[in-house]
Image (cartoon, helix red, strand yellow):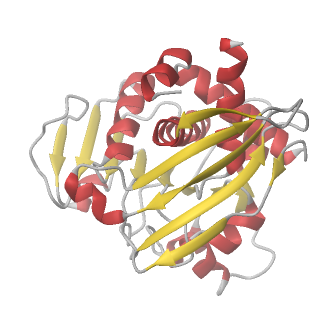
Amino acid sequence: MSAQEIEAQCSLREAIETQRKVFINHARGETVLGPRAVLSQGDNAQFSYIARASQSGPTIVKFGTVFPGNSAHNLPAVQTTVAVMNEKNGSLTHFFDGESVTQLRTVATSMAVAMELVPHAEKIGIVGLGHQGVAHARAARELFSPRELIGISRTSTTNSHDEFSDIGSDIRQLQDCDLIVLCTNSQSPVIREAMKPDSLCISIGSFAPHRCEVEPRLLMNAQSVYVDDVAISSQQCGSVCEALKTVSQPWEALKSIGSLFAKEGKTRITGENYFFSVGLGIQDAALVEYILGKVA
């Protein structure tokens, strides 16, 4: 299934609902998630994992590569394929364009968390203007209609994207943002200073133990640090891994987003709040299962 077919079959709001549902089910123990395998190769890596969004649903195997340098060549930093096995006979039935699945489910999860925690965000900042950054900006513009949408890029300060009010290179432009989304390939912190109260910072680039988009010490004073899955992120998310070395146990601020989505009503936030996503196979499986259900 091509990128165009995926886009035609699943809107952003539909994708958001698949992610809310699968994380609630994950918190209830109703998903099936195998371990992730990663082979490092300098700054690059190859990975694979297997998952089901439901006990009786189709099984997906996702495999791909992470090449941070690709962004400079207008290529996706993450390139993937999703293979689908039929739940009734085990046959390999579909291949999905992995970049499209990854981008849509990642953006959908980010937006689902933002809609819960900062539903009235008026000033939004996006750091990193690769494929994921621009996709997050488009989604934020559609869902929040913000007063300001600022892009931060190390390589370009030309506003070539209609989604942004302005594009700059100084992270200090985002100090008073309600929502900041980090979509970088940086291995060292991009956010080093505290944000304004009642704000949310989403990080999708701290997906390995050596990748820290947020200074770990900042998490010590956060109201909430949400993650895909506490056990998995404690081993794989760089900023969380480093913070856990110094934080007192148990760390009550660290929470899985399944618990956030399962709550009745909106969660009132104070102080600084973070969401770190390393990406789970159940996210891909949920999106794939939904699309296959529509085309069946």
Q: Quadrant of the C terminus?
A: top right
Numbered circles on residues, count: 0
Q: Judge whether residue 203 can be spotted in this image.
A: yes
Image location (x, y in percent) of residue 254: 71, 63
Give the quarter of the image for residue 114.
Answer: top right
Q: Is 187 left, or right, of 64 in this rendering? A: left
Determine if residue 223 is in view: no
In the displayed orientation, state which residue is furthest to the left: 158
The structure residue drawn at horizontal position 42% and vertical position 56%, both measured from the top left corner, is 196
Residue 5 image point, x, y percent: 49, 20
User: Quick check: 185 above or below 81?
Assistant: below
130 versus 58 height, above or below:
below
Place of residue 72 in the rendered image (x, y in percent of width and height, measured from the top left):
21, 58
Q: Position of residue 152 (x, y in %)?
A: 24, 53
Which residue does the image show at 47% across and 60% down from the upper left? 65
Q: Quadrant of residue 250?
A: bottom right
Using residue 52 as the reference point, say whether residue 110 is left or right of it.
left
Q: Is residue 191 left or right of residue 23?
A: left
Q: Is residue 77 above or below residue 14?
A: below
Q: Residue at x 75, y 32 (%)?
A: 21
Q: Residue at x 17, y 45 (%)?
A: 167
